[in-house]
Each structure stands twice: as C-alpha cells, then as structure tokens.
Image (cartoon, grey):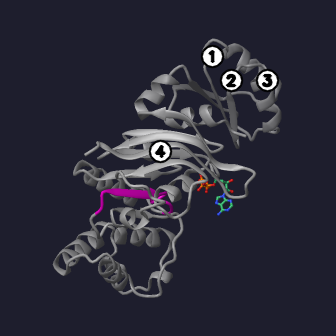
Amino acid sequence: MSDLAISVRSLRKTYDGIRYAVDGISFDVKRGEIFGLLGKNGAGKTTTIRMLTTLIKPTSGTIEVLGLDPQREPLEVRKRIGVVQQSESIDFTTVENCMKIYATLWEVPREVAKARTEELMELFDLNPLRKSRAFELSGGQKKRLQVARELLHDMDILFLDEPTVGMDPIMRRKVLDYIKRRAGEGLTVVFTTHFLDEADYLCDRISIMAGGKIVAQGKASELKVRYSGLRTLEVDAGSPVRDPAALREAIVSRGLAQDVSVDGSVVKVIGRNISRELDEVIRVLKANGVYPENITMREATLDDVFIQVVGVS
Ligand SMILES: Nc1ncnc2c1ncn2[C@@H]1O[C@H](COP(=O)(O)OP(=O)(O)OP(=O)(O)O)[C@@H](O)[C@H]1O
C-alpha cells in the first residue's frame, strides 16, 4: 500500500473557459498527515477540494485519492472520505435527529452510532441544543453540527473547508485538538483556513495558493525559516493615519519594505531590510505625517510569511 493518501499532478480547472481557478498545481499528502491549504479569497482552495472530493471535474491533470481516480470511481472515493464544505444546507430537523439521519446514511452500526453521537455532542457542546431545529442555530453552532455529524462515520481522509468559521476561540481549539487526535490515530486531513495561527498549530505541511497556483509549500516551521529575514515593524502614531495608500506607496516604492498595512493609528511595515533601513523608514513615516509614539520590531509570524508570499493587492 502506498504511503500517499493523495497525489495531484498538473491539476487545472476553469469554470468559464477563460480563467483558471486552479492553474497547474501538484502536491502529495501522506497518510496520517494534516495538510493545510491557505490563500486569500478566490485563491482556488475550495475548487481544489471540490475536485479532490468528486464534486466537480478537473479540466486537466491527474488526481489520485487513496489510489483511486475521483472522476472514474467517485462512489468508491466518497465511501472512504468525509467532507465538511464551506457552506452546506442545514436541515429542518432537530440537532439530535440530524445526527441520527447522518449515522443512518453512513450505515454506522447502531451501538457505535449511539456512542459516537454522545461523544461528539459532548465535545462540540451540542447537548443544550439537542431539541433545537438545525436551521435555527447560530452560524458557529451550525458549523459545530456540520463538523460533528461528519465525524460520525469511519473514513480514511477528512476534508475540511474552513471548518472553524464562526466558532469562538475555545471551541476552535477543541475542534483542532480533536482533529489532531484523529490524525494521530491515522486519519489524513486536508484543511483550509484563513486563520494562520490555526494552520501553524494544526498542520504538518502547508501550501499557500495564489491565483490558482501553489506559491509556497512546506512545514510551517520551514516556511518561517525560509522567510526568516522578514521583520515586522509596528508603529503606533497615536492618531489615525490620514492617507494610508500614499504612505504605503512611499515606503514600498523606495524598496524599504514589501508591505505596509494601516489599521487606524497602527502602521505595520513588513520587510527584509527593515532593521538596516529603520532610520529611512521613520523619516518617510514622518514625511507622511506619521509621528511614532510607540515602535516595536518582531520576527516574522506565519501571517507575515503569508502576506509576503501572496502580497496585499
Ligand atoms: N461555481 C463557480 N463558477 C464560476 N467561478 C467560480 C465558481 N467557484 C469558484 N469560482 C471562481 O474560481 C476562483 C477560485 O475560487 P475558490 O472558491 O476556489 O477560491 P477559495 O480560495 O476557496 O476562496 P475563499 O477563501 O473565498 O473560499 C475564484 O475566482 C472564483 O470566483
């Protein structure tokens, strides 16, 4: 048996015949690995997951999921995977019934289904909502139900497309720890998220996508090392920055930094040479009406790597 759960080569997908949503990506995922797909909105993550999970057909390229071709053997693939999609129809029935229906659909033996339902209801804090109808739940509660019901059945690979959206930090951590535990028991996980701290915490390996391509790939720690020259300078100007676009242009066009972002009075300057160019950066800040009241400099986080790789535009 191959130790690869997924193998993708030169995969492309166009919806309109003009633009490629996924544009020639190749990657492997080992069995038992947690693989993260990151990227800005529209990068091609969901399209990739939908092709891997048999929901849409590739335009070209090859996919192997557990040694099977999702296009030729969709039913075989579906039997062995779990998918939590980004948005999913939520039934009119109660939370309790929803779990029962899913267990029946997946043909989970009655006793196993009962035990798992109790475990998952407890874990995802769904007990107080047992009798609530699913469509009445809040966004985060719906997401909890959506993830819990998918975990009722046995599977070899679990695909999670932004599974923690709307969840509070405690629930997010619980879900991530549960996924980690299942991966420790041999489950392969493909995971997309916009929360880079989550990817850092959970994923063995990460691919960053932009414009349908994979633009960086590796362990979170490797990516951070690869971009370790990056520093983030954070400046608090005390009052809102008047013209963020002009400030950004002034710093980036001089090659002083790769990126500048402004949030109210706080300016974040990310780049490789910031320590060396600090005097010049501050001169330009002042020339643009930003008089620093507080300055901090720190190492790159995964967020910084992400911004560096995919850019801000
Ligand atoms: N059903 C569709 N029909 C036409 N174009 C689509 C369809 N689904 C996605 N696209 C386009 O394909 C590109 C990639 O979208 P995709 O949903 O894969 O990105 P994503 O990385 O998952 O984004 P997000 O983080 O917002 O979920 C986008 O330009 C999007 O507009």
Q: Most extreme residue toward the left, as rendered? A: 111
| Kind of element beneath mark 4 | strand
| Kind of element beneath mark 2 | loop
Q: Position of residue 114 (x, y in %)?
A: 21, 78
Label 2 with label 1: CB-CB less than 8 Å: yes
Q: Amino acid at mark 2?
A: Ala
The answer for how far apart the CA atoms under marks 1 and 3 are is: 14 Å
Classify 1 as above or below 275: below
Q: Position of residue 159 (x, y in %)?
A: 42, 57
Q: Is residue 1 magenta?
A: no
Q: Amino acid at mark 1?
A: Asn
Q: Which mark is on residue 8?
A: 4
The answer for how far apart the CA atoms under marks 3 and 2 are is: 9 Å
Label 2 with label 4: CB-CB less than 8 Å: no
Q: Which mark is on residue 296?
A: none
Q: Position of residue 34 (x, y in %)?
A: 36, 46
Q: Which residue is mark 3?
A: 253
Sequence-first tag of 4 and 3: 4
Choose top left, top right, bottom left or bottom right for residue 266: top right
Disc nearest the viewer among 2 and 4: 4
| Kind of element beneath mark 3 | helix
Q: Which residue is mark 2?
A: 257
Q: Nearer the viewer, residue 53 or 276?
A: 53
Q: Which residue is mark 1?
A: 273
